[in-house]
Image (spheres, rainbow, N blue to C red):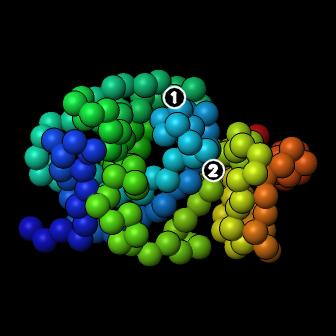
Amino acid sequence: MEFLAEGGCLCGSIRYAVKSEPEFIINCACSFCQRFTGGHYLVETLFPLDDLTVLSGTPKTYDHKSEGSGKIIHIHFCEDCGTKLFMTFERYDDIYGVSTGTFDNPNWFPRHRDTTKYFYISQMPDGVVLPAGYDVFYGHGLKLDGTHNTPQRFDSPTEVTPALRKAALEFARKNEEI
């Protein structure tokens, strides 16, 4: 089997590989993803379930109930060093969400405006800069029923501020996101 990229945990106990480019790149700033990473947001690359192979080691799994959907998120991590490698989802049972920073080369795939999204501007910390021309959502990109929310796009790089979050809330209300 030919793989496009490999990755693994900090201590090297667990190695994985993928055989396709990611379908989407999600930059999510919900409170779960902030705690998951310890940073402003999670950069998560989404792959079909059959496209990821664990090459060595056995990830441990922690099941977390999503505050948003009420569904279980399965967090797969190395029990030796604690690296959170990827997630699988009760809500989306056909994808892996790989923690992009765990790839040996996190720049191996292209990032395009049509495949890269920014979720949860409502919870993004002040000072995060959103790039021009990318889809940005007040909350999640999908409603609980699976329909798409309407994205915002900014014409120039835009800093997250309380005023921007307020304007994004109004946009979300107008477009029935919330």
Q: Nearer the viewer, residue 6 or 38?
A: 38
Q: Quadrant of the N terminus?
A: bottom left
Tag 2 or tag 1, which sits nearer the N-term?
1
Residue 80 in the image: state x and y as whole percent: 22, 30
In the image: residue 177, left or right of residue 165: left
Visible in this render: residue 51?
Answer: no
Residue 94 in the image: state x and y as whole percent: 33, 49
* Disc on res. 66: 1
In the image: residue 106, left or right of residue 30: left
36 to 2, vertically: above or below? above
Q: Residue at x 34, y 44 (%)?
A: 86
**Mark 1: which secondary structure?**
loop
Q: Quadrant of the C terminus?
A: top right
Q: Residue at x 47, y 29 (%)?
A: 71
38 to 55, vertically: above or below? above
Q: Residue at x 79, y 63 (%)?
A: 158
Q: Residues within 10 Å of mark 2 (few under 14, many from 20)?
A: many
Identify the residue position indicated by label 2 in the image: 119
Q: Nearer the viewer, residue 172 or 156?
A: 156
In the image: residue 109, left or right of residue 34: left
Q: Residue at x 24, y 50 (%)?
A: 8
The image quarter in which residue 91 lies: top left
Q: Nearer the viewer, residue 156 or 10?
A: 10
In the image: residue 88, left or right of residue 149: left
Q: CA distance from mark 1 to mark 2?
A: 15 Å
Visible in this render: residue 78?
Answer: yes
Residue 72 in the image: state x and y as whole percent: 42, 28
Say what amino acid the circle numbered 2 marks.
Phe
Residue 148 in the image: state x and y as whole percent: 62, 54
Q: Residues within 10 Å of mark 1 (few under 14, many from 20)?
A: some
**Mark 2: which secondary structure?**
strand
Say what amino acid the circle numbered 1 marks.
Ser
